[in-house]
Amino acid sequence: MPKINSFSFGSLTIDSKKYEDDMVIHWDGEITPRESSHTFSKSELIDILLKGPETIIIGTGTGDCVKIDKAAEQFARSKNIEFIIKKTPEAVEEFNKLSRNKKVIAVIHVTC
């Protein structure tokens, strides 16, 4: 299970490795770059669902700039996936807390 060690504007440290791009952190330890975007779409969600998460956390940036497509949120909930949307600092805390006991995927926007 990966752990987010720290977050500061423009960077994220996961398992002691620093990243300076938006990232997707999978419950099974896989860490993948996310194409930087200010929208989280249903098609992006469908790709993430292939990993079988129980919970998806979206970190919307420090200024809450990432907008969530309502169709994505509704689709996740229709599949009984817990769908949490928070500013990135709070999303990081939530991921570290929930990932101890659940299959959690976090989509983290590292800037605005």
Image (tube, rainbow, N blue to C red):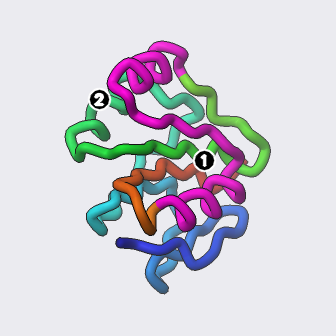
- Residue 92 on the magenta segment: yes
Q: Tell me which residue sits at (52%, 45%) in the image.
A: 57
Q: In front: 39, or 94? A: 94
Q: Which amino acid does label 1 sit on?
A: Gly
Magenta region: 69-98
User: What kind of secondary structure does the magenta stretch mostly adopt?
Assistant: helix
Question: Mark 2 Cα within 10 Å, few/some/many (few <14, many 20+)?
Answer: few
Q: Residue 46 carries which label?
A: 2
Earlier residue among tags 2 and 1:
2
Q: What residue type is labelled 2?
A: Ile
Horizontal side of 18 relative to 6 (left or right) equals left
Is 83 part of what is drawn in magenta? yes
Which of the labelled discs sits on residue 59, or is there none?
1
Q: Is residue 96 above or below residue 47?
A: below
Residue reaching furthest to the right:
63
Residue 63 in the image: x percent, y percent? 78, 44
